[in-house]
Amino acid sequence: MSETDAHTERDGATDVDAVVVGAGFSGLYMLHRLREQGFDVRVFEKGDDVGGTWYWNRYPGARCDSESHIYCYSFDEEIRQEWEWSERYPEQPEILSYLQFVADRLDLRRDIAFETEVTGATYDADAATWAVETADGERVTARFFIGAMGCLSEPFRPDFDGLDDFEGDWYHTARWPDEGVDLADEHVGVVGTGSTGIQFISETGGEADHLTVFQRTPNYAVPARNRPLEDDEYEEIRANYDEIWERARDSRLGMPFEHDHYSAASLSEEEIRETLEDRWQQGGFRFLHAFEPGHVLTNAEVNAVISEFIREKLRAKVDDPETAEKLVPTDHPYGAKRPPMDYNDYYRTYNRDDVSLVDVSDDGEPIERVTADGIRTTAGEYELDVLVYATGFDAMTGALLAIDIEGRDGLTLAEKWDAGPRTYLGLMTRGFPNLFTITGPQSPSVLTNMPLSIEQHVEWIADCIAYMDEHGHDAIEPTEAAETQWVTNTNMLADNMLFSEADSWYRGDNIPGKTSVFTPFPGGLDMYRDICDRVAGDDYDGFEFDQVADAPLAGQ
């Protein structure tokens, strides 16, 4: 039986077999994979082109923190041989061009409805189908509803008093204008020094007449050591791609880097520092691989040595000791938050006379309100012409909960996840049959190289749908016991790691009122992949199937 004949015919019909929301890395591959299996798929995308995260995040300095040769698809040999990256870490325009290239190469645009926002989806238990609604009033029925919106796609803007009072121009980095923004001769304020803020500040320091940075929490930004990729270097990558991908899939972070030492337990502090110095020169996530990353995130003593090593490096970059201390993180271990990369000498930006740093933490001068002329802190007012929010996202759950999703018996996803997300494998949630989430909460997702996690999820979902049709199943959802056990295991793993010592968007701590709970699966991509393979190999252990007389067959 061919892939395109993998599903069998049944009575009934839907508009399409599957609706996919989002046309970034996840949505494009999901569309391609299901189409290859003979299914009729409709993708809804809010933007006017493909790209997902890399369509929306056009701010100056936007760049990926995974190395380019692994921040791409592995499933298509011709694509990976034909495309060539220009730098070690690609900028936003190059990643967007790559995804546009893939969409054209695989003829994907014909099944994507652009400039179409999904606002609601309701499950019909009698027919085992989803009715998906869009902002322009369209209603599409499908057997499967697949969320491919990404983990970092719902922008968050702090609810400061006076937000609408500001008379200058304001922007959120995740919704930067296509035409760019001229910051020359402007007094610019930037709120936020996470990964996005670090990239933006590095790129625009010196462009504005004056740049004022409002920082609540400093981060450990390791130098990326970005550089162009040489032709002979790329030829070597191409020649060894199969081995590179195999190593990456079998790793904790989805990256093919070997660690120098699994553990630092038998090393002296001097030996640890020598190892770190070598890795500091390599830069990027190779630094995190000085030791096995799981060891770094569980051994507090080793992490303390690594954290202090980084602090010393950061202090040495900043001329003013007082400013340096504000930029040095002391409230959390290295890696307990998403570790940003320094692509453009971020810390030395603060040596400029036209760049100022304001500590708006509780111990500094917290922001009181936005005014007509700028930002007022407890210490005074900062006059601004332009205000930039580099304040990140309602991560992991925000994009899913922005859609009014109603499952079985009228239960909404917002109600189900009121005290934090509850999933099985980060792929499905009980009460919402045939709803799949690609790199959803409680999957490795943001703790890994995302394209590899995306590919693993897409392939698992596609195989599961094929299995359902081969066995005459109309609907699938987790059992209550499997879901509860998965949530418990995810929390237990996180509690036994240093993630528990930081307030972070991993836990939703950046969103006022959001339940603080660790949302990614912290056990590593290698462990997770093994679990998913075992579940599928055991006839989808932990899931239950249903057969509904009136249910349509995928493909009808």
Image: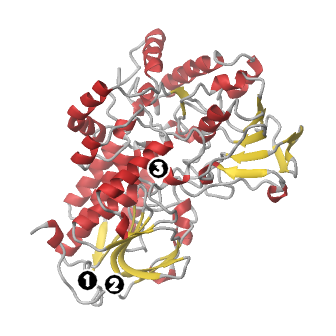
Marks 1 and 2: CB-CB under 8 Å?
Answer: yes
Give the residue at mark 3: 520
Q: Which disc is residue 556 wearing?
A: 1
Q: Which disc is residue 515 wearing?
A: none
Is residue 246 something that shows in the picture? yes
Observer-nearest of 52 and 109: 109
Q: Position of residue 275 (x, y in %)?
A: 42, 15
- Location of the C terminus by quadrant is bottom left
User: Residue at image x 49%, y 50%?
Assistant: 54
Indicate which disc, 1 or 3, sits on the residue closer to the N terminus: 3
The amino acid pointed to by label 2 is Thr
Reply above or below: 291 against 502. above
Indicate which disc, 1 or 2, sits on the residue closer to the N terminus: 2
User: Residue at image x 54%, y 54%?
Assistant: 56
Kindly indicate the quadrant of the structure image that contains residue 384: top right
Indicate which disc, 2 or 3, sits on the residue closer to the N terminus: 2
Q: Position of residue 161 (x, y in %)?
A: 82, 55
Coloring basis for residues = secondary structure
The amino acid pointed to by label 3 is Pro
Marks 1 and 3: CB-CB under 8 Å?
Answer: no
Reply above or below: 77 against 223. below
Which residue appears farthest toward the top when viewing the image? 270
